[in-house]
Image (spheres, rainbow, N blue to C red):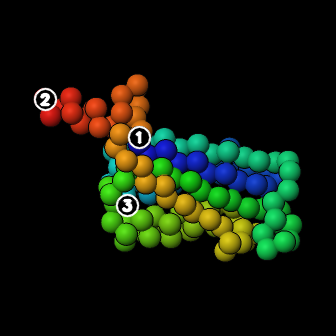
């Protein structure tokens, strides 16, 4: 944990932009949210077809971020800093067409509700304490 999904709606998204989103998102999680690098997973999902509307109007560039983290693992200020940093990263990477109505959502999950490698975080904690 964490798992971050960055969904981008745009006609084109270059490999360089994808790499910038991967590396920038990872850095925000490691440096600002104090997450261990080895547990940070980032998925950049490029949506080329379909329609995205904000305020009832079609947009040509849109983005939405869902970040799943452990419950109570970050302060409100750390989360606010992540959201601000993520918005800056998206704006710098995707350009002026990205609107301020871009949602960045942090979902906090209890330790017994997520895991990796087949073990919940609660079980990993229990085993490392034993």
Residue under label 3, please give it: 32
Q: Quadrant of the C terminus?
A: top left
Please rate how many residues cluster around mark 2, counting C-alpha atoms within 10 Å: few if below 14, some from 14 to 19, many from 20: few
Q: Count all numbered tags in the image, as a single digit.
A: 3
The percent coordinates of residue 6 (x first, y second) are 61, 51
Q: Position of residue 120 (x, y in %)?
A: 36, 33
Q: Residue at x 43, y 46 (%)?
A: 2
Residue visible at 73% across and 61% down? 62
Q: Could you tell me how far apart the alpha carbons at marks 1 and 2 are, in whole angstroms? A: 21 Å
User: Which comes sooner in the sequence, label 1 or label 3?
Assistant: 3
**Front-most of 62 and 126?**
126
Which residue is identified by label 1? 113
Please tell me which of labels 3 and 2 falls first in the chain: 3
Q: Nearer the viewer, mark 3 or mark 2?
A: 2
Taking the image as drawn, is residue 31 in sight? no
Numbered label attached to residue 130: 2
Which percent across, then down, holds residue 110?
37, 47
Q: CA distance from mark 1 to mark 3?
A: 23 Å
Q: Secondary structure at mark 3?
A: helix
Please give left or right for residue 6 compared with residue 37 in the image: right
Pinpoint residue 5: horizontal percent, then vertical percent: 58, 48
Query: Does residue 68 lie above or below 117 as drawn?
Result: below
Observer-side mark, 1 or 2, equals 1
- What residue is rendered at 85% in x and 56% in y? 51
* Number of other residues with Cα within 10 Å of mark 1, as a class: few under 14, some 14 to 19, many 20 or more: few
Task: Give the quarter of the figure containing the N terminus.
Answer: top left
Are discs 3 and 2 less than 8 Å apart at CB? no
């Amino acid at each position: 944990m964490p798992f971050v999904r960055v969904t981008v709606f745009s006609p084109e998204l270059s490999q360089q932009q994808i790499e910038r989103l991967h590396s920038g998102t990872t850095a925000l999680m490691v440096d600002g949210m104090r997450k261990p690098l080895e547990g940070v997973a980032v998925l950049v999902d490029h949506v080329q077809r379909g329609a995205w509307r904000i305020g009832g109007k079609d947009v040509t560039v849109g983005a939405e971020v869902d970040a799943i983290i452990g419950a109570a693992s970050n302060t409100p200020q750390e989360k606010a800093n992540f959201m601000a940093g993520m918005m800056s990263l998206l704006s710098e990477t995707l350009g002026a067409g990205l609107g301020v109505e871009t949602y960045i959502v942090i979902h906090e999950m209890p330790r017994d509700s997520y895991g990796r490698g087949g073990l919940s975080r609660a079980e990993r904690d229990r085993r490392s304490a034993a």
